[in-house]
Amino acid sequence: MANPSASRTATVTRTTKETAIEATVSLDGTGASDVETGIGFLDHMLDQLARHGLFDIRVRAKGDLHIDYHHTTEDVGIVLGECFSKALGERKGIRRYGAATIPMDETLTEVALDASNRPYLIWKVAFTRPKLGEMDTELFKEWFQAFAQNAGLTLHVWNHYGENNHHIVESSFKALARALRQACEIDPRAATVVPSTKGSL
C-alpha cells in the first residue's frame, strides 16, 4: 500500500518580465484556499477549484494588470498546472481518470479528464458576452489550456447549455475540481502501481 503519510504537496515559483507567481498545492487537503492574483473573478474560481476538489491551494501573483489580465491569467494556469504535476510525482496509485457533470441553475457543464501526462484540451464552451465584469471571457480558455498543458491532463470541457456567463464559467471550474479530485485520488486496490500498461505516465 502507498504510505498514507506521504506528502503530495508541491510549490512552484515562476518569475518573468510580465508576472511573478508562487503557488502551493496539496492534493490531500481539506479545500482550503488562500488566493491573491489581483483578479477578483479568477480568485473566486480558484477558491471553487480548491473547495470542490478538496485541494489546499495558495497562490500569490503579481502581474502587468495595467496592460490587461491575459499574462496573469495564463501564468497562474501554468504555475498551478506545474504544482499539480509535481505533486502527482510518478502518478503511482492514482485513479487517473475523472469525470463530473455539474448543474448550476440553467447551466450544465461536463468535464472528463485523464491525468495521463499527455496534455490536450478540448474546449466546447461558448460565451454570449466578451467580458465578465472586467475579465475577457476568452481568457478562461487560456487558463484551462495552460493548466492542462502543465498538469499533464487530457482535458475535455463541454458546456451543454446555459445562458448566464458567470454560471457557465463557475460550473466549468467546479466540474474540473470534481473530476480532478477523482483522478488524483489513490486507488486502494492499486496503490503502488502506475495506472498504465506502459508502466509509466
Image: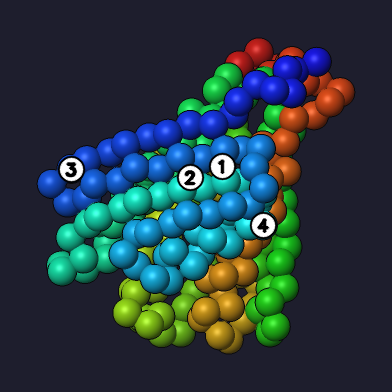
Q: Does residue 76 appear left or right of residue 32 in this picture?
A: left
**Which label belongs to residue 52?**
4
Q: Secondary structure at mark 4?
A: helix
Three-letter amino acid code at disc 3?
A: Thr
* C-alpha distance separating marks 1 and 4: 20 Å
Mark toward the start of the polypeptide (4 vs 2): 4
Residue 77 vs residue 29, the one in the foreground: 29
User: Please, what is the three-letter code of the amino acid marked with disc 2?
Assistant: Ala
Marker disc for residue 163? none
Q: Which residue is disc 1 drawn over?
A: 154
Of the image marks 1 and 2, the number of the one nearer the N terminus: 2
Task: State the separation of the CA atoms marked 3 and 4.
Answer: 31 Å
| Mark 3 lies on residue | 16
For the point 51% across and 64% down, the residue is: 45
For the point 21% across and 65% down, which residue is it?
65
Q: What percent of the width, then of the height, locates residue 98? A: 71, 45
Label 1 secondary element: strand
Q: Could you classify mark 1 by the number of other residues whose Cα lies within 10 Å: few (under 14), some (14-19), or many (20 or more)?
A: some
Q: Is residue 149 visible?
A: no
Q: Earlier in the sequence, mark 3 or mark 1?
A: 3
Residue occupied by mark 2:
148
Check whether the beta carbons of the residues at disc 3 and disc 4 lie within 8 A of each other: no
Mark with earlier residue (3, 4): 3
Task: Look at discs 1 and 2 and give the one toward the viewer.
Answer: 2
Which circle's residue, 3 or 2, is located before the other in the chain? Answer: 3
* Circle 4 residues within 10 Å: few <14, some 14–19, many ≥20: many
Q: Looking at the picture, which amino acid does disc 4 mark?
A: His
Q: Position of residue 155 (x, y in %)?
A: 57, 48
- Give the residue displayed 27% in from the left and 62% down from the top: 70
Foreground label between 3 and 1: 3
